[in-house]
Structures are given as structure tokens and as C-alpha cells.
Amino acid sequence: MPFSLRFVVPLALALAAIAYAVVPLVDRLTFQWFVRDLDARGALITQTAQEPLADLLNQPRVAKTRVLRYFDRILRGERIYALGYCDKAGRLAMATLAFPRSVRCPEGASAEPRSYVLTLPDGPLHVSINPLAAEGAAFGHLVIVHDMSFVQRRSDDTKKYVLILFGCIALVVALITMLIAEISWRGWVAGVKALLSGETLLRAPLGLKDPAAEVRPELQPIARDLQALVQDLEAERRVRDESQTTWGPEALRRILRQDLKGDEILIVSNREPYLHMRRKDNVVEIQRPASGLVTALEPVMRACSGTWIAHGAGSADRDTVDRNDHVMVPPERPSYRIRRVWLSEAEERGYYFGFANEGLWPLCHIAHTRPSFRAEDWEYYQTVNRRFAEVVQQEVRTADPIILVQDYHFALLPRMIRERLPRATIITFWHIPWPNPEAFGILPWREEVLEGLLGSSILGFHTQFHCNNFFDTVDRYLEARVDRETFTISYGGNPTEVRRYPISIEWPPAALQVQPPVEECRSRVRERLGIGKHVKLGVGVDRLDYTKGILERLMAVERLLELEPRWIGQFAFLQAAAPSRTSIEEYQHLDAKVQQLAARINERFGRPGYQPVILRIEHHDAAQVYELYRAAELCYVSSLHDGMNLVAKEFVAARDDEQGVLLLSQFTGAARELPEALIVNPYDIEQSAAAMHLALTMSPEEQRARMRSMRALVHEFNVYRWAGRMLLDAARMRHRRRVLSRARAAAAREAAAG
Ligand code: G6P
């Protein structure tokens, strides 16, 4: 039944019942009024007629005829049905024709006037009997009979009007009731909707009047419950949004616009996305560093704009900034700015080479390189983190910006920022693995590092495994509340959400746009390397780092040639290695060892015009790297331990021909996302060599099936989604914080008022 009818039907029924009860009452009343009216009329007619009647009766000869004529004249009056004259003896002496026989004269000359209703088959008659007197002497009675059928007609009319009246009243009352009910219902619904959508309680901009005051009084008791509901709905919306969005720069911009309302965004990392380098010939050129972190974050920053704070490490960096140490990038289409932070040589040595790369880097990677912890390096690490915190404070324009802190160079920075900007949303992303508590426990400043990180609002790792290691570590070394159900750690009153956000690359990669077809890449690269067209090519692309398993990779190539000599002269492996952290002894040793191993293999299996290992220890730009990926039959990523490894994803993205085989170390985060790769244990040289053979002999159909599936995943889970998920979580967190602070303010006001 429609909502309004629920009001109208009962109302109409009630009114009909009342009308039904009222009509007989009205009927009786109107009847009595008419009887009284006719009584009075009878008395009046008698009064008027008695004198002429006495005169006529005094003329005995003509009396009867004249009286009857007189009566006829009176009869012309309205509704008088019959008249009769009763003499003193109580006999009906004269009467008009219609006078009813049943009407009797009163006995005695001076009986009191009386009246009654006589019901005949033709209808009711009113009989009034009135005494007649002349000069003080009674001379009989005048009997006046009125026709009462008009009363019946009027009574029927009255009944009809009463019913119509009640009908009208019912209609009007029903309409008014419906209107009021509808208006209040709409208001109520609007109130609930506003609560649900948070427009009143949740969405009123800060600084405006108390939103709780806007809640309808009758809704205030449920407002609190609804807040919880709203948060659940919000969370659900996020999940839906996430699964529905096509992730690209526009989706990120939409999140910034809609969910974060254009809030300020800053990134802090050690490595800057563009270095200005002065060449030997004094020309300044721009270099893009070999850094997974930069590869991932740069497209995000291009989409978001904002400020990227980083160490100015390029030799011409100081010459290219403005007086505030800013430089707009990318050079071809500036869309965000870098704020460069200058470090002295000693600071760089202690903070970057020392504590970050000789301490934390080997500590977090299980690559069997011992970490070195020096108190002096630790001092510098603290100083530089503090310096960056000050720069963040200088750069922000608002009290609650979103700050994306990157990697192990800045473990102390989140807390330092929190102390300076308590309302900032600090998202820290740890790009490298997090070790188990035993391994981490050897760090002399383990508590300080953990406390520093727990200044973050959100702390991200690539895999759940690393999140769990972090929970275990905090559980072991700090007095903190670790809630593994909500993935939250509370330390010193500040909650930190610890989440898994697997990093990725932009899709489609910008470097792919400038690539020629695969066939052309194949022939160009082979020509440049001096290898025959028929020779199959494997590639490795890394920074020259001991965690990458480059030695193990080359050993696998060597073993392949031993086990399957048919590949000698038919297969070559190109290792592109960007020099990295070259001041560190361990890296220098690695460089030497890689060169020696390559030379040994080439000596064993090379021949004029053929070298099985082609080593290129130099910087390669993105276009060159993508050309190599497209030219190769296989790509081997053999990290001994890696947070994610974006080379694996880049190789997949580069192969729009759906050919090529990825060999992937099981110790990379990427292995969890790309199981269609040939997953290997890089320490197991035999297995890796066998996997290489398998890759080189894999059918094009199988290559296509595996590559297609991996490409779909990297496409869907691209870097915009990685950043988008973090930003959506940040938006949710900020939203909740605003609601809570309003609720607290309202409670405080209530307490003050009560
Ligand atoms: C890893 C780290 C990054 C770093 C990159 C390059 O990917 O997680 O923070 O930028 O290596 O290393 P570099 O020391 O040259 O910045």
C-alpha cells in the first residue's frame, strides 16, 4: 500500500463511522425543531383566526358556508392540510374536506392547546388543537392539520448534506495529514540521508558551525551509530572504487581532487628524479638515476604535482636551482618541483654511504654481506634526517599536508615530521625487505629506528611477509600495542597502519612509446653487440649491487654452456649494470668479481666474433633498457633478496609482442605477483641453468600464454594503483580524524554546557 494511503484509509473509515452515528441524531433534532415550529404556527393561526371566526359563528344562517370558505382561504397557506372547528360541546362542527377522521375533538370548551403527530399511510401529519375565545368566553377549538411530508424531505436532505459534509471534512483532513506526514517524512529521510552521507556530521567543512547542531533533534540519538555505519559504507565505497577504476594518471588526479580535496602532497626521498651533471666538456646534462624507487614515483608525481624533496647529488645541481633551491621538472614539460637539499661530503659519507648503505641495506637484505654500524654514521644519519624534517617544515603551506616518506634513508624522519606537523598524514614506504626480529636485533639503535618509523600514519611494505616481520620486530623490541587484526600499531598514542602495497611501474611505460617494432630492436641490438642474427640473447639489467645476484646469474650462464654445449655460439648473455654506491668497498669488490667472472666465462667459451657474456658496466637510459628487453629471448632477474624488483615488471611491459621468457628469483617480491615466470632459486646454479635452457627452447605459444597473463597483471596493478591505494587510505584516515575531532569538540561543548 502506498505510504500516504496508510494515513488516508483509516481516517476515512473513522469519519464514516462518526457520520453514521451522527445522522439519526441530526434527523431527530430537525424533526423536533419542525414540530415545535408547527406548534407555534398553529397557535399563531388560531390567534389570528379566532375573532373573524367568532363573528362568522354569530351569524347562524350563513355560518357554516362562510366558515368553510374562510377555512379554504386559510388552507391556501403553505403546508396546511386541513382545518376543523370543534364546538363547545366537543363535536366536530365544521371541517374541510381532507380533515382526517381519526382526529378527535377535545372534551370541554377550554382544554389546553395540544399537538401530536399522526402517521398515515400517505405520510405524517401534524395536528395542533388550539382553544378559541372571544371577549373572554371560550367558544370551541380550532384543529389545524399540517402536512409533514416536507419535514421528511428536509430530513432526507439534511442526512445527505451531513454525509457530504463529513466526506469533505474527511478529504480535507486526509490531504492535510498526508501533506504534513510527507513533509516530515521527507525531512526525516533527508536528515538520515545527510547523516549517512556525512553531510551534516561528517562533511561540514572545518571551521564552520558545529555540524552536530544541524542534525534534526529526533535524529541526534542515532547520530553516533550512524557515524560508525558511514565509516563502514565509506570503506565499502573505497573497495568498490578501487575495483572499478582504470588506474592511470587521471584516476590519481581524481582521487586528489575528490577524496583529498586538493590537499598538499610532498615526497621525500634521498634519490632525486633528475640530476644535473656537468660533463667533462662543461656541458650540463640531465640524468635519470637507476632507481626502482624513482622509476615508480616519478609518474606518480607527474600526475599529482606537488614538491619532491631530495638530496641534490648531481655535479651541476646547485647551478640549476632558483634561490629557494627549487627546480621545475620534467625538463620537457614541467609539472612538479624538486626541492634540493645539500649535504656536505662528511654528511653524505656518514648518512648515505655509511648508515643507510653499509648498515641498513645489508641488514634488511639477506644477501650474506655483513652490515657495519658506526656511531659516527648514526650521528650523521640523525642530523640529515633532522635537516630533511626542517626542509619539510619550510616547504609545506598547510598544517595537514600529505607527506610520502621514502625508504630506509629516512627511518627517523616520520617522527621528526610528526613533532613539527602533528596533523600531517605521513605515509612511509619501505622499498626494501624488512628482516625477521633476530636479524634486525643486531642493530644497536633498533628502538630508535622503530620509534622513528612509528611516527608514520601509514607504513607500507611490498609484501605481507615483510609487514609480519615488522609486527614481530615491534612486538619484540618496543612496548607497543600491535593489533594484527586491524594491522595497526599504537605507540605513544599514535596509531600507525601497517599495510602491504606492492609497487609497480607506469602502464604503458613512457619509454615504450618511442620503441620501434620488436624485429627492429632485435636486429639493431645484435648489430651493435656484434652478434649474429640467429644468436639467442639473454639480458640482465641492474644496478651493480651484491643483492642482485649478478655473480650467480653469470655462473648459471656458464653452467648452461657446460651442460648444453649446443648453446655455445648460439646464445649470449648481456649484463647491463649501472655503477652504484661506488665509494663502498663491498661494491668495488663486486665490480671486480663480476668482471673477472665474465672474463673467465668468455675465455672458456668465447671464440673470435663470439663472447657468451657481454658486460656493460655503465649507465643506460630508459629507452636503451627497453630496447634491450625487446631484443632479448629471455630476461633473468636473479636477486638474492629484493623488496619487489621492477626490472621484472619492465621486461613484461616491454613485450607487447607477447614473446620472451622471464626467469625470476623466488626471493623477489615480484615472484609473488608473477608466478607465470620461470621461478628459480638463484643460489641453485644447476636449477637456474636448466631454467635458462627451458626458456630458450620454450614454444612461442607457451611464451605467449605466460607473457599475456603477466602483462594483464602488471597492466591492472600498475604504479597508479599503488599510489592510489595509499592515497585513498590516507583520505579515509583524514576523513575519520576530522569526524573524531568534531565529535570530541561536540562532546567537550556538551560537557561545558552541562
Ligand atoms: C633501491 C632503493 C632506492 C634507491 C635505489 C638506487 O631501489 O630502495 O631507495 O634509490 O636502490 O640506489 P641509490 O643508492 O643509487 O639511490
Image: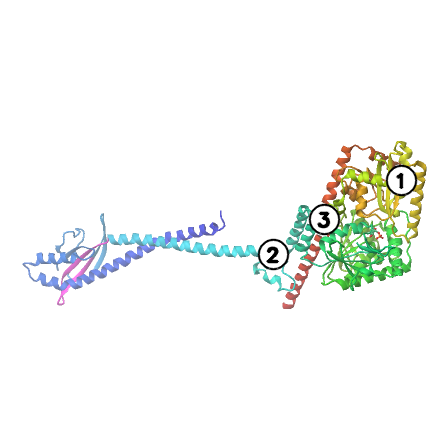
Which amino acid type is shown beneath numbered disc 3?
Arg
Q: What is the x, y in percent for residue 711? A: 74, 41
- Please report whichever mark, 2 or 1, sits nearer to the chain's N-terminal start: 2
Bounds of the magenta segment: 128-148
Please tell me how crowded label 1 is: few (under 14), some (14-19), or many (20+) other residues with Cα within 10 Å: many
* Residue 732 placement: quadrant: bottom right
Helix, strand or loop at label 1? It is: strand
Compared with residue 694, is residue 114 higher up or lower down, i.e. above or below? Answer: below
Residue 739 falls within the magenta-colored stretch: no
Q: CA distance from mark 3 to mark 2?
A: 30 Å
Residue that badge 3 annotates: 721
Image marks 2 and 1: residues in contact by CB distance under 8 Å? no
Q: Is residue 93 left or right of residue 379?
A: left
Please tell me how crowded label 2 is: few (under 14), some (14-19), or many (20+) other residues with Cα within 10 Å: many
Query: Cβ(mark 2) to ligand 1 < 8 Å?
Result: no
Total numbered badges shown on the rendered structure: 3
Q: Is residue 408 visible?
A: yes
Q: CA distance from mark 1 to mark 3?
A: 38 Å
Q: Is residue 559 left or right of residue 662?
A: right
Q: What is the x, y in percent for residue 475? A: 81, 53
Of circles 2 and 1, which is in front? 1
Quadrant location, the C terminus? bottom right
Residue that badge 1 annotates: 613
Of residue 302 and residue 317, the one placed in the foreground of this image is 317
- Please report whichever mark, 3 or 2, sits nearer to the chain's N-terminal start: 2
Helix, strand or loop at label 3? It is: helix
Residue that badge 2 annotates: 195
